[in-house]
Image (tube, helix red, strand yellow):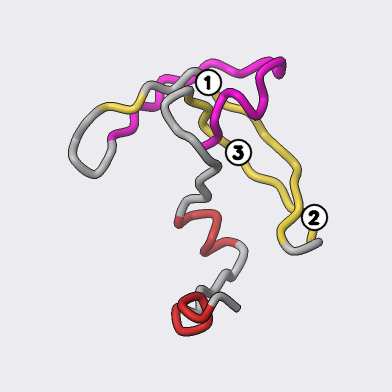
Amino acid sequence: MLPRRLVRNTPLQPTNIRIFAANGTPIPVMGTLTLRFQVDGVPTHSNFLVSDAVDEPILGIDWLQENNCQWDFALALLGL
């Protein structure tokens, strides 16, 4: 998911996808787009749902798995 404010002037593709917060509340989706970006200097891309109801980018489990991401919670707790 991507906040609309980060791609304010970018045209969006329509979508019928509906998503919900963990508590079951619907999250409004304005459209989709494919965005190229970098993670720790490594170029990548993703298809994002765009909403004005989220405050920061969210990468889904599908993207994390496709990119073989690993989260080291011990290091994260240390701030490393």
Spatial CA span between label 1 and label 2:
23 Å
Q: Which residue lies at the image location 74% right of the left edge and 53% below the top edge?
A: 44
Residue 4 x, y percent position in the rendering: 57, 24
Q: Mark 1 or mark 2: name the one nearer the start of the chain.
A: 1
Spatial CA span between label 2 and label 3:
14 Å
Please identify the quarter of the rendering in which residue 53 is found: top left
Please identify the quarter of the rendering in which residue 32 is found: top right
Magenta stretch: includes residue 65: no
Return the residue at label 2: 43
Circle 1 crowding by C-alpha within 10 Å: few under 14, some 14–19, many from 20: some
Give, as a single range, the part of the protein colored magenta: 1-20
Spatial CA span between label 3 and label 1:
11 Å
Does dot 2 land on a helix, a strand or a loop? strand
The amino acid beneath tag 2 is: Pro
The amino acid beneath tag 3 is: Asn
Q: Is residue 49 left or right of residue 9?
A: left
Q: Which residue lies at the image location 60% right of the left edge and 18% below the top edge?
A: 13
Return the residue at label 3: 47
Circle 3 crowding by C-alpha within 10 Å: few under 14, some 14–19, many from 20: some
Indicate the quadrant containing the C terminus: top left, top right, bottom left or bottom right. bottom right
Task: Pick the residue in front: 53 or 45.
Answer: 53
